Image (cartoon, rainbow, N blue to C red):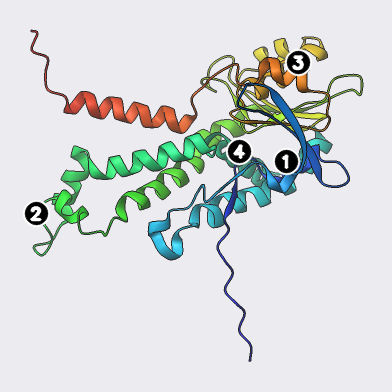
Amino acid sequence: MTTSKPQNPPKRHHFVPKFLLKNWCDVQGRLVLYRKVHNGKVVRDRVAAKSVGYEDDLYTFEELGPDATIIETKLMSPLDDRAGKIVASLIESGGHELTEPEMIWWSHFLLSMIMRTPESVKSLKAVALEMWDAPNAKIQADYLNLKTDNDPATFEEWASQDDGEGGHLLGVKLLNSLTMNMAVAGHIRTMSWSVMSLDTGLPPLLTSDRALFSSNGIKKRNGQLLLPLGPRHLFCAFHDKNFEAEIQAEPADHLVDMARKLVTVRAQAHVYADNMKETAFVSKWMGYEKSASIGEVLANNWKAKHTSVASPPSAKQ
């Protein structure tokens, strides 16, 4: 009898899934990477899609031992596998012939694209440790109600015995619960979906390390999600059908220009294309808008609230 060698845990954690990036590739599996170098100049290279859009151990929690890569293996990778199989149906049907399970999975995939950028993940990891070290009143009260006579007197004393795992487990829970949030994914599911196919005379769509554009509040009238699926296909989801009609009434070249700018202005380090002719466009727009990731926003909100509660009252009355 033979035994198989245990697989090494995945190290490359893609925040821009490979199944999306391959749609910008040539027959050799390469796309064009645009990036800024130290002097602000934009340079370009043809690279393999598998070599970009990832960060080593991005979702890893090393302190959790065998479960260190659980976010990658049990959440992000399965989501990407399902979403990769759904994209073809989206493009073929314009987004109108998906099954209910496919729509639910695609909604969670879109939510993952909001949550999983490096800036977002690192902020959520860090704030989880801070939250664990500064439990709120509800956590402390719950502990007092649940503890036995053999347990430490306070939550803080109990938490100090966890060998440092508690904050990392909370980080796993945060990433999972935010990505699999049924309320937000449920709203995405109810938005009006479509896939725009570009005529050959229009410039190709780009993508970047911030591939998904999400408006500031998807429940507002102008609430929208835009995700390029390839150089010639743009996934759109709108909260308000009247606003959607206004957008779709615009000339096609205006919509394409907007989509190209949205993924470029928010790019942190890389823009991806299917051609070598985008240097001037990327040079003008890359990094033009410095927007915080959702993880950074959530972390800063928690810190502000916690600081305001913990701070002593002002001496000025």
The three-letter code of the residue at mark 1 reads Leu
Left or right of residue 234: residue 159? left
Residue 2: x and y in percent read 63, 88
Answer whether labels 3 and 2 touch (C-beta < 8 Å). no
Give the residue type that dot 3 points to.
Asp
In the image, residue 310 sits, relative to residue 166, either above or below, namely above
For the residue pair 218 and 103, the one nearer the viewer reads as 218
Q: What's the CA distance linking mark 3 and mark 2?
A: 61 Å
Look at discs 2 and 1 and give the one toward the viewer. Answer: 1
Q: Secondary structure at mark 3?
A: helix
Element at badge 4?
helix
Q: Earlier in the sequence, mark 1 or mark 4?
A: 1
Position of residue 163 relative to residue 269, above or below, is: below
The mark closer to the camera, 1 or 4, is 1
**Tag nearer the camera, 4 or 3:** 3
Residue 225 % position (x, y): 63, 26
Q: Residue at x 17, y 28 (%)?
A: 310
- Viewer-side residue, 65 vs 220: 65
Of the 4 image quadrants, the one containing the C terminus is: top left
Quarter occupied by the N terminus: bottom right
Which of the two labelled residues, at mark 2 and mark 4, occupies the earlier sequence position? 4
- Sooner in the amino-acid sequence: mark 2 or mark 1: 1
The residue wearing badge 4 is 107
Q: Outermost residue, bottom direction?
A: 1
Please identify the residue farthest to the front as the structure is shown. 39
Relative image position of residue 62 (x, y in whole percent) = 42, 57
Residue linked to disc 3: 257
Q: Which amino acid type corresponds to the residue marked 4 in the rendered image? A: Ser
Q: Which residue is mark 1?
A: 20
| Number of numbered callouts drawn | 4
Horizontal side, residue 265 vs residue 248: left or right: left
Residue of label 2 = 153
